[in-house]
Every structure is written in C-alpha cells, then in structure tokens.
Amino acid sequence: MGLGTNFHDLGARAGRTVPGKTAADYLYTSIVNPDTFLAGGYQDGLMSREYEKLLTRQQIDDLVAYMLTLR
C-alpha cells in the first residue's frame, strides 16, 4: 500500500466517497484536514496538515479543480 490514494479516476471517485459531500467539498476537506475522511487501511497523521497555511485559498481551489478533471 502506498502513502496516499491513487489519482486515477480521482475526480469521479471523489463525488461518491462520502454521502452528502460533493466531489469538490470532499477534495477540499481532504487537503486542508486530511484525517477527516480516512480511506480503509490508512492511519491518521500520515499526511501534512500544513497545506492550508502554505497555500492560498485560490491555490487550493485550483488544485481541487485540477483533481476534478482526473476522470
């Protein structure tokens, strides 16, 4: 198992991962608070929690927009 999720088809999978969450909301939350939705087999604390401090809101939104194209 790798450190994180496979990006193949990520944009499509993100919308059906957490009921009631849009793909964009799921991805944004996963970037700024990566322990909120842990995929099976992964433990909390592995991913950086600093992205919200290191990136502007626009940069995070742009990253989410890019991830949504991965279908």
Image (tube, grey):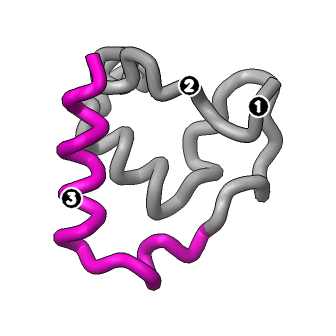
Q: Secondary structure at mark 1?
A: loop
Residue that mark 2 sits on: 6
- Residue drawn at point x = 20 percent, y = 29 percent: 69
Which quarter of the figure has residue 5? Answer: top right
Q: Amino acid at mark 3?
A: Asp
| Disc ID at residue 2 | 1
Q: Is residue 62 magenta?
A: yes
**Residue 25 appears in the rendering:** yes
Task: Using a 10 Å C-alpha cutoff, classify the residue at mark 3 as few (fewer than 14 neighbours), some (14 to 19) or many (20 or more).
Answer: some
Q: Secondary structure at mark 3?
A: helix
- Residue drawn at point x = 44 percent, y = 18 percent: 8
The image shows residue 63 at horizontal and vertical percentages of: 28, 53
Task: Using a 10 Å C-alpha cutoff, classify the residue at mark 1 as few (fewer than 14 neighbours), some (14 to 19) or many (20 or more).
Answer: few
Disc number lying in front (3 or 1): 1
Q: CA distance from mark 2 to mark 3?
A: 20 Å
Q: CA distance from mark 3 to mark 1?
A: 25 Å
Q: Which residues are magenta?
A: 49-71
Question: Quick check: 37 above or below 1?
Answer: below
Q: Amino acid at mark 1?
A: Gly
Q: Is residue 52 magenta?
A: yes
- Residue drawn at point x = 45 percent, y = 83 percent: 53
Residue that mark 3 sits on: 61
Disc number lying in front (2 or 3): 2
> Mark 3 or mark 1: which comes first in sequence?
1
Are the residues at dot 1 and dot 2 in contact (C-beta closer than 8 Å)? yes
